[in-house]
Image: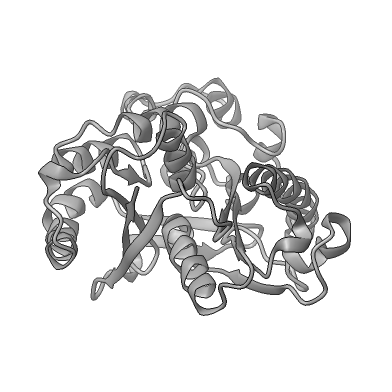
Amino acid sequence: MAVLERARGKALRPRMEQILRNSGIEQRYLAMEPDYYLGTRSWAERARLYAASAEQLFKAAATDALHAAGLTAADIGQIVFVSTTGTMTPSLPSRMLDEMGFAREVRSVPVFGYGCAGGVVGLSLACDLYRAAPDKPVLLVCLELCSMAYDHAQMEKKDMVALALFADGCAAAVIGQGSGDAPELVAFAQHVWPDSIDMMGWDIGDTGFDLVLARDIPAFVARDFAPVADAFLAAQGLAKTLLAQPACHPGGGRVVDALADYFGDDLADTRTVLRDFGNMSSPTVLFVLKALLETGPLAGPTVLTALGPGFVGALGWLKP
């Protein structure tokens, strides 16, 4: 909050201070020092910094995932790369072929535009690609540099919310490495609500993206997302009372509260990831899933949820 007050040249209004304190976030990671984001940035500078930081994060996350699976980059048959906060042509995976040692025949599948829903959507796509070509594993990488995307020059209420809520992060996973104790994505569903495009997304500004974010997403969870989730669970023969702790994308503190009310679960790991890393958009749900797996095999059927631009809901469930 001190950075925001310095940028505005005056103290925050009590209501804004309350919003920030109720975010559920205690710390986040950013690609640059906080003061950097308070100056004017051109699109060219944003693109250059996105490329430099994205390459480092992609390599680190992918290397960790490959090591955990006992594989090398040359073992991978396909790469699903999810990012909505920056674009590169050729895509980032194509630029990493030589540096990381991927095979020349590797297939790269960039996914853009799903925002916070990208982690669940990307996981489902990676699983579908592996099932279609199971001879080689698939590498999923979700990377977002939210701090590079937004335009904070105006410092309006929505700009301050974006600056305080969103963070940078990267997560990777290998699908189909043959490990007997790895969970299996059994089913996936996606739902788009009519007349909801203005609930979440970006408008293109002069020097960055201007955040579009509805205030009533927590209410939307209870009113509109819950029936869709109920239908998904019923179709899969799953009862909420028999589920293990879900892995939910935490849009913010109040959104987590609404999801916790729906599932009847405090969502402890979802809250911990939000507290320690902030809303990193697409990678966040993979951070939550990793936290769940670090305590051992999943305790039962585990539901994945995320809401993103569209306005789209993404759901899946994992079998231990």
Q: Is residue 24 left or right of residue 265?
A: right
| Image position, residue 304 (x, y; %) | 33, 52
Most extreme residue toward the front is 180
Q: Is residue 56 visible?
A: yes
Could you say which quadrant of the image residue 223 lies in? bottom left
User: In the figure, 129 relative to 303: above or below?
Assistant: below
Colour scheme used in the picture?
Answer: one colour
| Image position, residue 313 (x, y; %) | 30, 63
Q: Is residue 119 left or right of residue 54?
A: left
Give the residue drawn at x 47%, y 56%. 119
User: In the figure, 8 relative to 300: above or below?
Assistant: above
Q: Is residue 23 visible?
A: no
Q: Nearer the viewer, residue 159 or 77?
A: 77
Give the residue drawn at x 48%, y 70%. 125
Give the residue drawn at x 73%, y 73%. 106
Most extreme residue toward the right is 98
Q: Nearer the viewer, residue 138 or 12?
A: 138
Image mark count: 0
| Image position, residue 68 (x, y; %) | 63, 42
Q: Is residue 42 left or right of residue 148?
A: right
Could you say which quadrant of the image residue 235 lies in? bottom left
Could you say which quadrant of the image residue 204 lies in? bottom right
| Image position, residue 172 (x, y; %) | 60, 50
User: In the figure, 160 relative to 281: above or below?
Assistant: above
